[in-house]
Image (spheres, grey):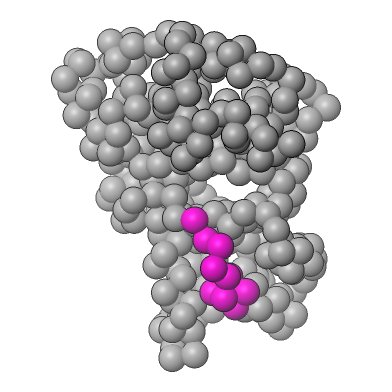
């Protein structure tokens, strides 16, 4: 089983990599890389899958992906269906040796080092005052070099260290061997879910798609996601429902069936379990 390592383009004259993406949709295959990744979502909505869990992302959110943490940004369906939609993000890439051996171990960066360890589980900072504060750093760093680039990078880290708004995504951090174990087969399962979650899908079909027996598939999936297959599919469906509820173009009943639930009361129950409120309250919150 081959993993999905991902190589970040590097230049010899920069220790910090900055990448500005404007695409129909983000790279949506499960992958990992040794670099930490700090991504500002400029224009996009969808679900970030990181480690064994997931969270919604939207315009202005900031995602901090840890070293070797398997992840993918899955845009909402409209980015795949509508040519006029564009997904845009600015990402910063660095590793422990970017600024020299032991740089993040010095006493002055003790708090930053703690943040890096937290980011190994994936962190999401929702849009708000932090976005207004940090967006200028990202915009400047696209074109910066030398000391100016390092100054803004360290200032950005300082702001993240001081923020109290971080949401941890995965329940565990990953090393390289774990990331390799989560490789191509898990990506096949996730792609199967993305393509079919709006329909009735079964464990048997998922096991067949991954070329495993049903017991082997259940063990494999639980090992890498810490959830049963059905629980994970329901979470994908609820995240898709959140976007439709915010758009307010369909009734709650229509949304339930649109994302794959065939029972409205089950949809309400699963939604409340995952989001802490019923769908109608969630929709009112975003009116």
Residue lying at 74% horizontally and 69% vertically, measured from the top left: 133
Residue 4 image point, x, y percent: 42, 39
* Residue 10 visible from this viewpoint: no
Q: Quadrant of the N terminus?
A: top left
* Residue 65 visible from this viewpoint: yes
Queried whether the magenta region covers residue 84, the answer comes back as no
Asked if residue 35 lies left or right of residue 63, the reply is: left
Q: Is residue 128 above or below residue 230?
A: below
Instruction: Count how many numbered circles sit on residues in the image.
Output: 0
Which of the 4 image quadrants contains residue 37?
Answer: bottom right
Viewer-proximal residue, 259 or 154? 259
Viewer-proximal residue, 25 or 236? 236
Asked if residue 192 lies left or right of residue 179, the reply is: right
Residue 204 image point, x, y percent: 28, 10
Residue 248 image point, x, y percent: 72, 25
Q: Quadrant of the C terminus?
A: top right
Viewer-proximal residue, 234 or 10? 234
Give, as a single range, the part of the protein colored magenta: 158-167
Q: Residue furthest right?
A: 84
Asked if residue 262 lies left or right of residue 204, the reply is: right
Residue lying at 18% horizontally and 23% vertically, measured from the top left: 216
Q: Is residue 82 above or below residue 166?
A: above
Queried whether the magenta region covers residue 162, the answer comes back as yes
Residue lying at 49% horizontally and 67% vertically, measured from the top left: 95
Q: Residue furthest bottom?
A: 107
Which of the 4 image quadrants contains residue 235?
Answer: top left
Residue 23 image point, x, y percent: 73, 37
Q: Is residue 151 above or below residue 6?
A: below
Which of the 4 image quadrants contains residue 265?
Answer: top left
């Amino acid at each position: 089983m081959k993993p999905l390592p991902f190589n970040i383009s590097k230049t010899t004259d920069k220790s910090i990599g900055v990448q500005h993406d404007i695409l129909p949709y983000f790279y949506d295959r499960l992958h990992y890389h040794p670099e930490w990744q700090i991504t500002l979502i400029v224009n996009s909505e969808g679900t970030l899958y990181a480690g064994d869990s997931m969270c919604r992302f939207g315009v202005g959110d900031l995602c901090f992906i840890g070293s070797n943490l398997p992840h993918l940004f899955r845009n909402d369906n409209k980015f795949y269906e509508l040519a006029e939609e564009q997904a845009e993000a600015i990402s910063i890439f660095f590793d422990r040796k970017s600024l020299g051996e032991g740089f993040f171990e010095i006493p002055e960066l003790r708090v930053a080092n703690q943040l890096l360890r937290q980011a190994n589980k994936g962190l999401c900072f929702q849009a708000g005052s932090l976005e207004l504060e940090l967006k200028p750093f990202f915009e400047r760093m696209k074109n910066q070099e030398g000391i100016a680039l390092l100054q803004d990078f360290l200032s950005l880290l300082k702001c993240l260290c001081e923020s109290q708004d971080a949401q941890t995504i995965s329940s565990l951090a990953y090393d390289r061997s774990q990331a390799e174990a989560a490789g191509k087969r898990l990506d096949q399962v996730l792609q199967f879910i993305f393509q079919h979650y709006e329909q009735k899908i079964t464990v048997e079909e998922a096991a067949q798609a991954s070329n495993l027996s049903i017991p082997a598939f259940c063990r494999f999936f639980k090992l890498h996601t810490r959830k049963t297959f059905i629980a994970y599919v329901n979470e994908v469906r609820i995240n898709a429902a959140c976007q439709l509820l915010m758009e307010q173009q369909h009734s709650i009943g229509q949304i339930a069936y649109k994302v794959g639930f065939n029972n409205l009361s089950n949809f309400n129950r699963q939604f409340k379990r995952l989001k802490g409120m019923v769908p109608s309250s969630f929709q009112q919150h975003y009116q």
